[in-house]
């Protein structure tokens, strides 16, 4: 949109919202028998998102499986929920300051 | 990629947990009910959850593999034999003096109720977090 960094931030926020969706799904299905926790590998997905690929979710391994075959850990999801929120917050503040600079440039050019 | 569908997923979770809590409360209220329209004592009910793909708009159809909501697939009715208590003076007592009572353990239902309530809260937390992200995106224009 504005420059290379803004594009990266945009992809970053896109990917964060995709991950937040998965976290929401995991929380909603915390009591669904047989449901397995879904997640994306953030680091590698960000690298491929910069090339325009869409994220591929996978089933998270190594979580404790309950008697009904469900392996959602609410603690893990709560951590990810907060983490994603903060990262999104940071990225949106950065992007906002970029937009602010452009706006300032436009306004100071109007001669008022 | 819209964040609004994430809210739809959490809302489906809230609706499912609410249904579960309603059934649990019904079980607790009817723990001693010996007469029902179907005849016989009340039978314990429980909700069976199943995940289901969520698609709130055409665009999100393509991304529906990313998110799964939850829905109450069926309401299971306890088919175990009722608990028999010896109460010869009871109007519903059989010829042998035993009355059929529902096989409900209030402690079990209370534990499930707390779990349903906590899961509901987790979904509320998810919605408020997603709402924050949406508000942040809107604030970009300010």
Image (tube, rainbow, N blue to C red):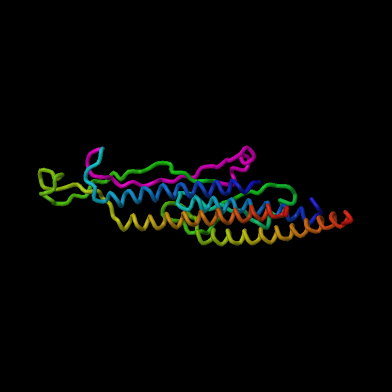
Q: Is residue B56 magenta?
A: yes
Q: Position of residue A95 (x, y in %)?
A: 74, 57
**Looking at the image, which residue is at 35% across and 43% down?**
B76
Instruction: Report the side of A10 relative to B132 (left or right).
Output: right
**Looking at the image, which residue is at 54% across and 50% down?**
A25
Q: Between A57 and A17, which is closer to the camera in this rendering? A: A17
Instruction: Report the side of A6 relative to B17 (left or right).
Output: right
> Which quadrant of the rendered structure holds the C terminus of chain A?
bottom right
Q: Position of residue A37 (x, y in %)?
A: 53, 53
Q: Between B127 and B9, which is closer to the camera in this rendering? A: B127
Magenta extent: B38-67
Q: Is residue B111 magenta?
A: no
Image quadrant assignment for residue B59: top right
Image quadrant assignment for residue A105: bottom right
Q: Position of residue A39 (x, y in %)?
A: 59, 53
**Looking at the image, which residue is at 33% across and 48% down?**
B26
Image quadrant assignment for residue A102: bottom right
């Amino acid at each position: 949109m504005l420059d290379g960094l803004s594009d990266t931030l945009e992809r970053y926020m896109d990917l964060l919202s995709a991950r937040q969706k998965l976290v929401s799904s995991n929380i909603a299905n915390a009591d669904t028998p047989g449901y397995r926790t879904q997640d994306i590998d953030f680091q590698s997905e960000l690298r491929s998102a910069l090339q325009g690929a869409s994220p591929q979710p996978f089933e998270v391994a190594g979580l404790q499986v309950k008697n009904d075959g469900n392996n959602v850990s609410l603690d893990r999801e709560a951590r990810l929920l907060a983490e994603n929120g903060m990262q999104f917050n940071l990225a949106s503040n950065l992007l906002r300051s970029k937009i602010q600079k452009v706006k300032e440039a436009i306004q100071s050019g109007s001669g008022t | 990629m819209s964040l609004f569908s994430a809210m739809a997923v959490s809302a489906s979770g809230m609706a499912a947990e609410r249904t579960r809590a309603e059934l649990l409360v019904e079980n607790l209220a009817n723990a001693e009910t010996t007469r029902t329209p179907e005849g016989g004592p009340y039978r314990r009910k429980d909700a069976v959850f199943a995940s289901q793909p969520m698609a709130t708009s055409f665009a999100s159809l393509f991304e529906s593999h990313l998110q799964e909501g939850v829905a109450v697939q069926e309401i299971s009715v306890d088919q175990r034999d009722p608990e028999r208590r010896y109460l010869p003076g009871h109007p519903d007592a059989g010829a042998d003096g035993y009355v059929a009572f529902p096989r409900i353990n209030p402690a079990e239902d209370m534990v499930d109720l707390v779990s349903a309530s906590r899961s509901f809260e987790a979904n509320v937390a998810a919605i408020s977090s997603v709402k924050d992200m949406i508000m942040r995106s809107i604030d970009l224009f300010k």
